[in-house]
Amino acid sequence: MRFKISRRNFLKMAGIATTGLMMAQLPNNQAASAAESSDTKIKYGGHDIPLLYEAEVCVLGGGPSGVAAAVSAGKRGAKTVLVEKGITLGGLQTMGNVIPCMTTWAPDSDTAFVRELKQQLENHGIDYNDHHEGSEVGIWTNPEALSLIYDEMCQEAHTEVLYNTVFVDAIKKNNTITHCIVQTIAGLRAIKANTFIDCSGDAILARSAGVPSEHGFEKTGNNQPMSFRFEMGGVDLDKVYQHVTVELGDDFCPTKPPHYEFAEARHRTRQYVLEKFMVDGIKSGELTEEDAEYMQAFAIVGKPGHISMNCPELPLQFSASDPLSYSRGVMAGRQMINRISQYFIRHMPGFEKAYLAKEASMLGARESWRIRGKYYMVEDDYHNQSRFSDAVARTAWFIDAHGEKVSEKLPKGAYYEIPYRALITNEISNLIVAGRCISASFILQASMRIQLV
Ligand SMILES: Cc1cc2nc3c(=O)[nH]c(=O)nc-3n(C[C@H](O)[C@H](O)[C@H](O)COP(=O)(O)OP(=O)(O)OC[C@H]3O[C@@H](n4cnc5c(N)ncnc54)[C@H](O)[C@@H]3O)c2cc1C
């Protein structure tokens, strides 16, 4: 069966952007067989590359958008392969330690995929729902549970997952992609597919196929700042809550442990209660100005005593779209993690017995490259609550471009839509791009980039 791209098929395929998608219920299907064809070779760079896999749908990148795309396509009966360079699915959610899925605030934005994910979290005993209307978090997750759940969802959808496999290049014939070349544990291999879905976050497949793209804020050239998230164990969360919320009177978080967060952001207009705590660290010489710029922490459901730090936020000189600068950012970030974690252990009530439990295995790039597709979403789409005849998603999450712009929230019940045309391109007829790298301006992307919900 040829899996033809159309908005209708896409809607049925479900959950492809990182925001909530309005998708039709998917039928359960019989799996396509996962036959490997190793007898065919593809010419690439003067070499004969063995064909590893032939699929109807090839999804690149196993982040939230890639899993949604691959599971949904598999469930529809399309023989699907998901290519992931790590050895877990979830992308930033798991490898990047981005544990909370923010709410879209848009009515009825849950897709079939999100509904199933919630059910799976419940089945695995993850208390994902804080049941608070004012909460910004839609789903509280746990990276280890998510890794397992995503594996299980792919298995159930008969989606083949290729781990430890890195996209290298796209092979094209006229305006279609015929193959992807990937680096596997066995060497270079080719994947043939009818439809390719780029969920790499960096639009690497689309860019390789010649789709125009942009990166960074048009006024400065800077990407959004990256963060190097980390996890601390041995934390007495009730004691933290008592100190921050009860004694200091911080009203930032409307919920209590186990659904609890605290934060500070010095560059925001709002004066945060915890700003003094971080500034004291600068005064004592334990923290740098950059360490104290942004700090946020989330409890991790299902991991009592563990807290996920949404920091340090790396200085803007470290870019998500420059390989050398990115790598130097890893080292600078690791130093920042060391200073911040030690400072918390020394000074924050509840952290006396805490320790650094885990570093993210992927830097947190909020924005790197974005494609220029058939429709280019702009800030006005947010403020005007744009509607489209080919809408595939809706969200009302505010514009959160760190260091550049934080917008007012839309009124209750308001939302804007994401058109399918922002996911497809003029150049390639069998390519869909989903997730944080769709066709959107820097500022609009800062609203649509949230995970799943
Ligand atoms: C620091 C930070 C904090 C955030 N906080 C929140 C939050 O609190 N709540 C919220 O809802 N959202 C948050 N977000 C946004 C959200 O996490 C991302 O926008 C979302 O995860 C993007 O999903 P994605 O699938 O597009 O990309 P990603 O999650 O980036 O996934 C891309 C996947 O593609 C794989 N990949 C990339 N290149 C290749 C290649 N060449 N070969 C093979 N595989 C490849 C990667 O390994 C990865 O698994 C945050 C983001 C950051 C960076």
Image (cartoon, rainbow, N blue to C red):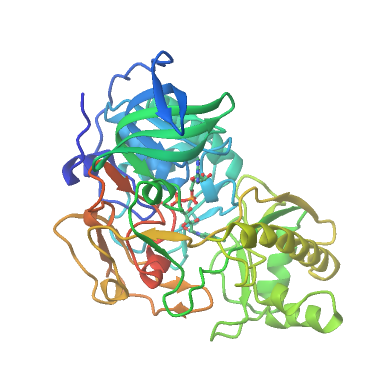
Q: Identify which residue is drawn at 40% across, 56% down.
A: 437
- Foreground of the two, 162 or 23: 162
Q: Quadrant of residue 323?
A: bottom right
Residue 340 horizontal side relative to residue 193, left or right? right
Q: Is residue 436 above or below residue 120?
A: below
Is residue 125 something one can see in this rendering?
no
Across and down, in percent, residue 263 comes to: 62, 71
The quadrant of the picture occupied by the N terminus is: top left
Is residue 372 something one can see in this rendering?
yes
Residue 345 horizontal side relative to residue 264, left or right? right
Q: Is residue 190 above or below residue 396?
A: above
In the rendered image, the residue lying farthest to the top is: 39
Residue 352 horizontal side relative to residue 374, left or right? right
- Foreground of the two, 380 or 36: 36
Across and down, in percent, residue 359 comes to: 70, 51
Q: Quadrant of residue 41?
A: top left
Q: Is residue 200 above or below residue 377?
A: above
Q: Is residue 420 above or below residue 120?
A: below
Across and down, in percent, residue 140 comes to: 52, 52
Across and down, in percent, residue 261 comes to: 60, 64
In the rendered image, the residue lying farthest to the front is: 46
Total numbered labels: 0
Q: Identify which residue is drawn at 32% across, 50% down.
A: 110
